[in-house]
Image (spheres, rainbow, N blue to C red):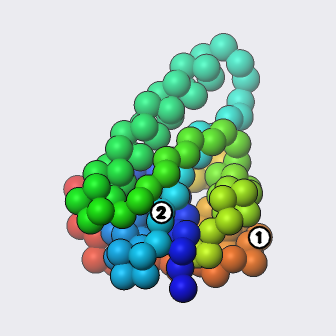
């Protein structure tokens, strides 16, 4: 039923919760998971290059965490780091990778990156894609 599942992550608790659900589904249906982190590219050059490098490093850590989950469960995983607008990159990645399902958390980024875009990334993905999307609520996520 779900041969290939895309789980976008931003390293947040909500992203981790979504990744756990993606792993459960992949394990149950014998599917594979594509883990995706999107580096937002915007703003003036100069100091922005440093911000992009920081985001890439955070992305690798977030993908490492999802890969560890996959290893624990014996789920096949492919890692992807893309650059662009998160919602658009997620929708494009889902089409590029031929996924059957997208699994996303309800909350994630905060601060400037959240304010700079109208609406949530999850909401925009749901509006832009025709691929079924499972939205994992974060009410049970413990706040630090």
At 55% across and 69% down in the image, what residue appears? Answer: 4
Mark 2 element type? strand
CB within 8 Å, label 2 to label 1: no
For residue 137, say whether it is visible: no
Density class for disc 1 (Cα within 10 Å; few <14, some 14-19, many ≥20) is some
Image coordinates for residue 138, horizontal then vertical, percent: 37, 74
Tell me: 128 left or right of 143. right
| Pair 2/1: label in front | 2
Mark pair 2, 1: CA separation:
21 Å
Q: Secondary structure at mark 1?
A: helix
Outermost top residue:
46
* x, y percent for residue 95: 73, 63
Q: Is residue 58 above or below residue 26?
A: above
Q: Residue 91: which disc?
A: none
The x, y position of residue 132, in whole percent, is 64, 81
As drawn, is 102 to the left or to the right of 24? right
Q: Residue furthest bottom?
A: 1
Q: Depth check: give the residue in front, 73 or 58.
A: 73
Q: Earlier in the sequence, mark 2 or mark 1?
A: 2
Q: Quadrant of residue 87?
A: bottom right
Q: Quadrant of residue 3 in the image?
A: bottom right
* Of residues 94 and 14, the one drawn nearer to the viewer in this rendering: 94
Q: Quadrant of the N terminus?
A: bottom right
Q: Quadrant of the C terminus?
A: bottom left
Q: Which residue is mark 1?
A: 128
The residue at 50%/34% (across/down) is: 55
Image point (36%, 54%), residue name: 66
Residue behind mark 2: 33
Residue at 65% from the left image edge and 52% from the top image edge = 86
Query: Where is residue 102 shown, x and y percent of the image?
Result: 57, 71
């Amino acid at each position: 039923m779900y041969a290939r599942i895309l789980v976008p992550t931003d390293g947040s608790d909500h992203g981790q919760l979504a990744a756990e659900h993606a792993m459960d589904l992949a394990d149950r249906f014998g599917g594979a998971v594509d883990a995706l982190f999107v580096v937002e590219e915007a703003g003036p050059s100069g100091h922005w290059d440093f911000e992009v490098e920081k985001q890439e490093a955070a992305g690798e850590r977030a993908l490492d965490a999802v890969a560890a989950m996959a290893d624990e469960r014996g789920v096949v995983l492919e890692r992807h780091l893309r650059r662009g607008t998160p919602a658009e990159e997620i929708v494009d990645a889902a089409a590029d990778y031929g996924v059957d399902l997208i699994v996303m958390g309800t909350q994630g980024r905060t601060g400037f990156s959240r304010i700079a875009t109208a609406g949530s990334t999850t909401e925009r993905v749901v509006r832009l894609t025709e691929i079924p999307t499972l939205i994992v609520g974060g009410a049970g996520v413990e706040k630090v």
